[in-house]
Image (cartoon, rainbow, N blue to C red):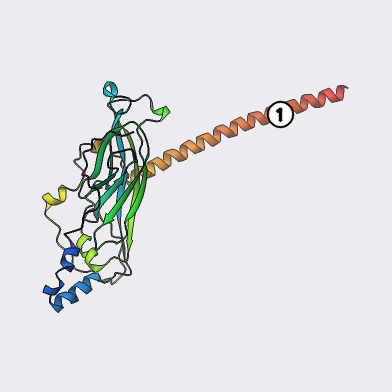
């Protein structure tokens, strides 16, 4: 299945976190009591609020054509990205890709955006994608399951080196009762969706966003593969649903015509049978 080369970051085991909120908590002896009160306020839960982070995960696979061999027929990339290619590292700390056991070092850890890895091989298999969040977001990781797709469907035509196979899934990660610190940090970030707030709801003051250059390093709007990314906008989804509804209605109309024709033939056979019985 696999080829041993990889362009992703590789680590045998998770490394201890030396940044973010965890490092601050290790310096408690140097923190004044007023700072402790501030930390408690930032950890307070916003019980009437939830926020969501749209994500897309999947893979793009290119057939190698004449360069393909028995055990290396495709070059593929598996990834997690923002719903419309925003930087999700404001919420996601690291992503672990669990490949097939036949790969060298099948557990691949990516500690920074873009959250992706590239490999080459010939076989399709299920990849477990585990999202680990920042400490102020969620302690529990999220496990996603993606079946690596290399070969096109039969009705899609023959394999091509120019047109890749793209399989993506859309999801929204919903965080209920976020802490004030988490919400303050991400409320103005483009990757985060904040619903309509209850009347009179007092928001914590926002934390200034990091500089634009740093934020751009985490988005995938200018990714080399972005031309192949799927568009999961609501308008496109409505158009797809409308087209599917038309196809279903047309199929139903065809079936009704066929049933009507069969019913007419049945009536003709019954009439002919009645005539034969009468003649006897």
Quadrant of residue 8 within the rendered picture:
top left
Nearer to us in this view, 24 or 240: 24
Q: Position of residue 279 (x, y in %)?
A: 87, 22
Magenta region: which residues?
1-14
Residue at x 13%, y 74% (from the top left corner)? 29
- List x then y, in percent, for residue 147: 37, 40
Above or below, 99 relative to 184: above
Count of marks overlaid on the render:
1
Identify the residue at horizontal 15%, vertical 48% (top origin). 216
Q: Is residue 120 left or right of residue 255?
A: left
Image quadrant where one finds the C terminus: top right
Quarter of the image where one finds residue 43: bottom left
SS at mark 1 in the image: helix
Q: Is residue 38 magenta?
A: no
Magenta region, main secondary structure: loop
Residue 5: say if magenta.
yes
The crowding category of the residue bearing disc 1, from other C-alpha atoms within 10 Å (few below 14, some 14 to 19, many at least 20), is few
Q: Residue pushed farthest right? A: 280
The picture places residue 237, in percent across and down from the top left corner, at 37, 44
Question: Which x, y percent locates residue 5?
Answer: 23, 35
Report the side of 79 relative to 19 (left or right).
right
Residue beneath the point at 21% across and 55% down? 90
Q: In screen coordinates, is 227 left or right of 279?
A: left
Q: Nearer the viewer, residue 88 or 96?
A: 96
Q: Which residue is mark 1?
A: 266
């Amino acid at each position: 299945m696999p080829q041993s080369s990889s362009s992703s970051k590789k680590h045998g085991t998770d490394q201890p976190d030396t940044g973010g909120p965890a490092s601050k908590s290790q310096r408690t002896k140097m923190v004044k009591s007023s700072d402790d009160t501030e930390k408690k306020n930032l950890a307070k839960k916003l019980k009437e609020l939830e926020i969501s982070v749209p994500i897309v995960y999947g893979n793009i696979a290119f057939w190698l054509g004449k360069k393909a061999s028995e055990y290396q027929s495709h070059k593929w990339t598996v990834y997690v990205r923002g719903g419309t290619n925003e930087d999700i590292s404001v919420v996601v700390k690291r992503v672990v890709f669990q490949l097939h056991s036949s790969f060298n070092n099948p557990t691949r850890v990516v500690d920074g955006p873009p959250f992706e890895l590239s490999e080459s091989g010939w076989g399709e298999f299920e990849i477990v994608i585990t999202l680990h969040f920042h400490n102020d977001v969620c302690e529990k990781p999220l496990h996603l399951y993606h079946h690596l797709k290399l070969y096109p469907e039969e009705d899609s035509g023959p394999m091509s080196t120019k047109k890749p196979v793209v399989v993506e899934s859309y999801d929204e990660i919903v965080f209920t009762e976020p802490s004030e610190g988490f919400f303050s940090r991400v409320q103005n970030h483009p990757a985060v969706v904040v619903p309509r707030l209850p009347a009179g709801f007092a928001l914590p003051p926002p934390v200034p966003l990091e500089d634009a250059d740093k934020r751009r390093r985490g988005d995938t709007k200018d990714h080399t593969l972005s031309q192949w990314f799927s568009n999961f906008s609501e308008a496109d989804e409505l158009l797809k649903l409308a087209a599917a509804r038309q196809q279903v209605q047309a199929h139903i109309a065809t079936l009704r015509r066929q049933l009507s024709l069969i019913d007419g033939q049945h009536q003709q056979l019954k009439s002919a049978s009645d005539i034969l019985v009468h003649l006897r």
